[in-house]
Image: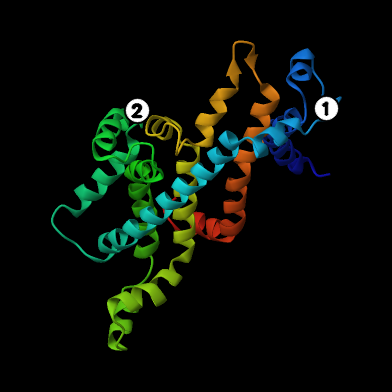
């Protein structure tokens, strides 16, 4: 083995260690986890996963999270695509200031907006719905998606637009059949970041839900009791929360690689 290969291998193992430890803990009982240090489960158990898949409170937490994350990703991309196109193709009064203002929303902590959203959604009847969380996350995801997509769109020559108009394409047809496929790498990157932010965000998701749309991140807090935490159950839930993100990465992996090379990210 060449010496220069040692450092990357050590780094990868260092990154994988927490994931391995989480998986190993998910097959242990809480007593074994607290009883001492062990690299492998001494007594393998599937009880932690069995409880998650049989208890409606647990599996509905995953379903709720997937629902509002999917809704948010679709809304964010639908709003960001035309907005990014406008920023990349047109110049208008205050365009640079508006673009910077969009980014300032992404820089603000979620705690700043938790109370206003709570009062607003309670007043209009959106509290404890998937749409409430999806719309709240749009405040952060749409500016991020616009920023990413504008970088890709600016890299596409304007001659492409002009050629399509000469060939008789209407704008909707050109945008859907020619332009979006041209920047599909950027769309994949934007979708990835929107999905991941909405999936891991806890404060707004927990504040704006109670029962019907309660996400898995909030459900995981119920492992705490007077006797302590159910660590094995918590570890199993943690393993299952990694899977959706891994699936998304798998399907957009090629676009992410191109996106980091061609876009602003």
243 w.r.t. 128: above or below: below
**Residue 242 figure quarter:** top right
Residue holding disc 1: 41
**Seen in the image, is 88 located left or right of residue 238?**
left
78 w.r.t. 100: above or below: below
Residue at (28, 59) in percent of width and height = 83
**Residue 205 figure quarter:** top left
- Quadrant for the N terminus, please: top right
Residue at (59, 37) in percent of width and height = 56
Residue holding disc 2: 111
Disc 2 is placed on an element classified as helix
> Which is nearer the eye, 144 or 9?
144
How packed mark 2 is, by other alpha carbons closer than 10 Å (few <14, some 14-19, many 20 or more), is few
> Which is nearer the eye, 186 or 11?
186
Q: CA distance from mark 1 to mark 2?
A: 39 Å
First-in-chain label (1 vs 2): 1
């Amino acid at each position: 083995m060449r010496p220069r290969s040692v450092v990357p291998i050590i780094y990868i193992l260092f990154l994988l260690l927490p994931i391995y430890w989480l998986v190993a803990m998910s097959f242990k009982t809480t007593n074994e986890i607290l009883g001492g240090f062990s690299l492998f489960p001494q007594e393998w158990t599937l009880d932690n996963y069995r409880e998650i898949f049989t208890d409606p409170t647990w599996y509905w937490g995953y379903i709720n999270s997937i629902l509002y994350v999917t809704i948010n990703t679709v809304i964010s991309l639908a709003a960001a695509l035309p907005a990014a196109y406008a920023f990349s193709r047109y110049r208008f009064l205050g365009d640079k200031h508006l673009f910077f203002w969009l980014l300032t929303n992404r820089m603000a902590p979620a705690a700043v907006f938790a109370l206003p959203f709570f009062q607003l959604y309670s007043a209009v009847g959106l509290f404890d719905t998937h749409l409430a969380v999806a719309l709240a996350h749009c405040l952060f995801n749409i500016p991020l998606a616009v920023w990413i997509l504008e970088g890709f769109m600016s890299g596409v020559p304007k001659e492409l637009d002009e050629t399509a108009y000469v060939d008789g394409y209407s704008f909707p047809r050109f945008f859907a059949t020619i332009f979006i496929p041209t920047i599909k790498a950027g769309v994949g990157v934007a979708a990835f970041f929107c999905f991941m932010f909405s999936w891991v965000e806890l404060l707004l998701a927990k504040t704006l839900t109670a029962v019907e749309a309660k996400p898995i991140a909030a459900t995981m807090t119920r492992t705490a009791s007077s006797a302590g935490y159910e660590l094995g159950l918590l570890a199993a839930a943690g393993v299952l929360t990694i899977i959706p993100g891994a699936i998304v990465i798998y399907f957009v992996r090629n676009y992410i690689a191109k996106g980091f090379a061609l876009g602003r990210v």
